[in-house]
Image (cartoon, rainbow, N blue to C red):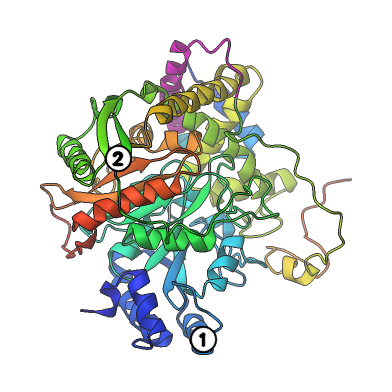
Amino acid sequence: MSLLDLTALELGRAIKRGEVSVPEATQAALEAIQAKNAENNAFITVLNDRAMEQAAEIQKKISAGELTGPLAGVPLAIKDNICTKGVKTSCASKILGDFQPPYDATLTEKINAAGGVVLGKLNMDEFAMGSTSETSFYGPTKNPWDLGRVPGGSSGGAAAAVAARECWYAIGSDTGGSIRQPASYCGVTGIKPTYGTVSRYGLIAYASSLDQIGPLARTAEDCAAVLDAIQGKDPRDGTSLDVPCGHLLEGLTGDLTGMKIGIPTDCFGDGLDSQVSEKVLAAAQVLKARGAQVEQCSLPIMEYVVPTYYIIAAAEASSNLSRFDGVKYGWRAEGYEDLTDLYNKTRTEGFGAEVKRRILLGTFVLSTGYYDAYYKKALQVKAVIKQAFDAAFQKYDLLLMPVAPTTAPRLGESLSNPLQMYLSDIYTVSVNLAGLPGISIPCGLDSKGMPVGAQLIGPALGEQKVLNAARAFQLDTDYHKLVPTIKGGDR
Amino acid sequence: MKITEEMVDYVSILSRLKLPQEEKTRMTGELEQIIGYMDILNQLDTSKIEPMSHTFPVKNVLREDEVVPSFPREALLQNAPVPDGEAYLVPKTVE
């Protein structure tokens, strides 16, 4: 068995026992990246020398007993929209050029404090806008299970790197499904925590009221350990919550006795692939066998979630992305006549098509004459969506539904029809609108051999329940242990 | 709802974007399709519902007014496309 087949926690224990050194593990991961990145393009930046230096320092601290956490010495990679001091952070956009942040995101500081070795920065959809990782300026990431298919997005590089055994875990961000959907497409476990529990300081903003950082890993246990390391109140993020955290891993019992899980029938209708439906419903039986009470329920909001999400997300994006103007950082166009022309040229040439589409859409829904009909309306429907979840969680501890309507589509299929791509986010976006925790866990392969994900959603701050159910499922199944065997892309 | 190229021109000005004709034509059609789909929200009567911007109640977040060092100027200018050692350079804006 290769070092890279261990889970993050298994590697952490092996390092603690002195069976593996941190530089050995780091070297193994860098070699895997070297071998695989040319075909799957999961990384934008690989930190060969810096990672080895960091590994040596962390090994010293572990040996001296200064670093004792469960993830100490375990190498990881970070999505390229999270600031890493002195290391290029591009958001997969031309407009940021070779931007090297002068500071670390709170996430990066916390990973450093936990003894994480940062292997590199991961590919993504430009500014996290997209569901396929094809909108990256640095070229698409490819799915390790089938290089002719997309890894999902926007944290596609993160999901692909974990699935292809290039790192033990990865940090992504999720605004409308960007952790859970690629986790599903690539057969890994990924959780979007409750809004406000992981600081967004240093996460380059897409839609601030929805953005949340979270881990992608091999198991729910690994995800719990990462959340323990990265959650917590941060005075530098005004929306960060002051709630207890740091005990998820020790709280994983795997016992579901008395837990009530609802399956919203509204999520199993038209447009859902029959094999995905079958696998997700089979997952419910596994949870039942472990003591959960499972029953059908209703969530009568599904037709409204995608328009609500895209109005709010685009509106916030149009405002957040106004800072990219070719003056303060990043790339500037050439041949401009005056200041307005400098802005226009830089933004028109520096942003890709999907980003421009969302900026224009967001500007439209916020503009005079349309604000009430679209933006304000969406904020009202958001309240309705929140109420529907509140009502469901009066009766159930968790909800179970698909992550995506299908398994990973072929490269190029989604780019031709933006609305079609938006619609594929139907099962993930409502969780962001309501600020809830949601996890994607592998629950089988379809007839093409592509992974299917099941989604467990909990009430606000219900991470422990979500992770516990996911852990219970993984104690009784082996889907999360399946390893992709790379083929040329003809399934 | 009908989206015209004039409307796209107007939001482009607000967005500081200047799309080439071909891109503008394509974008106009795509935006019409997307915004048309969003009209589905009108099926829902929300006349008695307060708009919700944050799912958790967000209050003013206050902190002590302590003096802390700001970023060194050189560190920030390092990322500027055209700095002059002291400032960001842009074309002349005031005659």
Within 10 Å of disc 2 (Cα), the crowding (few <14, some 14-19, many 20+) is: many
Residue in the picture at 46% in, 13% down: B44
In the drawing, does residue A480 fall left or right of residue A456?
Answer: left
Q: Quadrant of the C terminus of chain B?
A: top right
Residue A152 picture location, percent across and down: 33, 49
Q: Chain of mark 1?
A: A
> What amino acid is found at the position of numbered circle 1 in the picture?
Glu
Image quadrant assignment for residue A477: bottom left
- Tell me the tag on residue A53: 1
Dot placed on the residue nearer the N-terminal end, 1 or 2: 1
Q: Chain of mark 2?
A: A
Asked whether the viewer can see residue B40, the reply is: yes
Q: Position of residue B81 (x, y in %)?
A: 68, 63
The residue type indicated by label 2 comes to Ala
Query: In the shown orientation, is residue A334 left or right of residue A167?
Result: right
Q: Which residues are magenta?
A: B25-51
Asked if badges 1 and 2 are on one and the same chain, I answer yes
Q: Secondary structure at mark 2?
A: loop
Front in this rendered view, residue B75 or A463:
A463
Which secondary structure lies at badge 1? Answer: helix
Q: Which residue is mark 2?
A: A404
Nearer to us in this view, A264 or A123: A264
| Residue A259 numbered mark, or none | none
Q: Is residue A167 visible?
A: no
- SS majority, magenta: helix
Left or right of B30: which side holds A290? left
